[in-house]
Amino acid sequence: MLDDLHALAPLDALRAILGPAGLLTDPADLAPALSDWRGLYRGEAMALLRPADTAQVSACVALCAKHGIAIIPQGGNTSMVGGATPETRPNQVVLSLARMNRIREMDPLDMTMTAEAGVVLTRAQEAAAEHGCLFPLSLGAEGSAMIGGLLSTNAGGNTTVRYGNARELMLGLEVVLPDGGVVHGLRRLRKDNTGYALRHLFVGAEGTLGIITAAVLRLFPAVQESVTAFCAVPDEDAALALFRRFRAADEGAVRAFEYMSGPGVELVFATIEGAVRPLAEPAPHYVLLDLTASRQGAGLRGLAESVLAEALEAGEVTDAALAESEAQRAALWRLREEHPEAQKRAGGNVKNDVSVPVSRVPEMIRRCSAALRELIPGSRPMPFGHMGDGNIHMNLVQPEGMDPAEFLARAHDIMDCVNAIVRELGGSFSAEHGVGRLKTDMMEEWRGGAELAAMRAIKAALDPQGIMNPGKVLPPG
Ligand code: FAD
Ligand code: 2HG
Ligand code: ZN
């Protein structure tokens, strides 16, 4: 069968593998797959492949390897770093996992879910809930991002502080290698020390080493009780002090601890319809936090009230609102989750997805904000994000009235300005979004020497032709 296919022209052979529904070449069908959520990149591809199962992925990859055709794996296409967007060059295809969206198995006893790469995160969360369990990964793009993409970027999000990154939620993987071979690693073992932990190599590899087709995911007990609090805080140190206070009171209860700047929240009110002000007075900084427990009667409301009362007394909190209903909880979270959209609507904005040790977050925010204001007078720093993980989106919104193109032309100066401070504080230039296409030029400086050499050796060993997602993660050379 493979020999017959290899006799055909590549696109005809791919069509023979995938059937008419599995191969699209009409420019209108391809267009959404050729650009990214941020609108930074636009690429080219001769076709969009939409395999329905692992055998089809394997056959497509083997055929592409034979013809030297590059493959760009794509899930929900929500990458913040252009990781799923093809470059502008010939002889490449985008391979979407969207049709591979079956949940193959749920096991509430082993607390595992075996899901295909194209399962959308909200569907995985719902499936877990239908079995009385929790799949805890949660982030703003959860209605589009897919299991394969989430694992390939080792996504973080709002619950990392409690449950870890996507990597910590994965027990086993099925992967198609760049020669079409299949790693059948869907083991649901908590312990499995059998040589190199290959499964972890593909997590965070951003599609440069192979295609994840399915994964065994860890489940947790469902949430039975929760409290959400939206707090006004006077400064960054107070926000961190509040985190310490809640952690000390009950570390296991803190599901999310998110920081937002006053100007960032005001931008949400200004640009997002229906955003509701939860506190009487605007504040310079805010914290949104969730406490959850897997048993009823855990007393989380009392805990939140007593910790907040102490924090008010200590001057760490100036006002706070506790959600009284699911609708209020959603409204509070909306103020946080609309930050990316609000910043997009404000014209040019430059993202800096950075991390530092948690203890250095206040200093990082203060120093970066001051340096950015000096670099571009009138620009608006709007840091927000996962304070409990030391991961802040140190974003900069353009000055009002400035031409967005003029502002975006300074993007690399802006990233360099933030990165220099982050480096001094022992941090990382990419905390959760990955390297993709946007940050390859930072790899030499940050990961050069033996670390980058080892990464290149792994890439060369698994993908000697360099057909898997070229131009991503590793710098040229
Ligand atoms: P894609 O964007 O399609 O792909 C991402 C990368 O993975 C690409 O390099 C692609 O080639 C590769 N890839 C995709 N599928 C596979 C596969 N099956 N096998 C191998 N490689 C594959 N990220 C966070 O970490 N935390 C957040 O809080 C967060 N919030 C976000 C909020 C918004 C509004 C948006 C737009 C994005 C956000 N992101 C966040 C970024 C993004 O959602 C994540 O990176 C997500 O994991 C990407 O999933 P995806 O399915 O869209 O992958
Ligand atoms: C989030 O935490 C995402 O909302 C997006 O990681 C961050 O827009 C951003 O910079
Ligand atoms: Zn984030």
Image: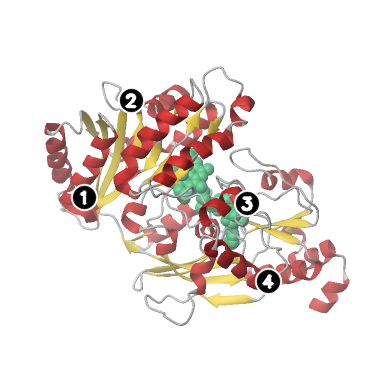
Mark in the foreground, 2 or 3 = 3
| Residue kind at label 1, given as amino acid type | Arg
Do residues under tags 4 and 1 come within 8 Å of each other at their CB atoms?
A: no
Label 2 Cα crowd, 10 Å radius (few <14 / some 14-19 / many 20+): some
N-terminal of the two: label 2 or label 3?
3
N-terminal of the two: label 2 or label 1?
1
N-terminal of the two: label 4 or label 3?
4
Q: CA distance from mark 2 to mark 4?
A: 51 Å
Q: Which residue is mark 3?
A: 84
N-terminal of the two: label 4 or label 1?
4
N-terminal of the two: label 3 or label 1?
3
| Element at label 4 | helix
Q: CA distance from mark 3 to mark 1?
A: 37 Å
Numbered tag placed on residue 247 in the rendering: 1
Disc 2 under 8 Å from ligand 2? The reply is: no
Task: State which quadrant residue 163 falls in.
Answer: bottom left
| Element at label 2 | loop
Q: Is residue 323 visible?
A: no
| Element at label 1 | helix
Residue 400 x/y as whole percent: 52, 18
Q: Which residue is mark 2?
A: 277
Residue 316 vertical placement versus 5 (above, below):
above
Q: Which residue is mark 4?
A: 58
Residue 63 x/y as whole percent: 77, 70
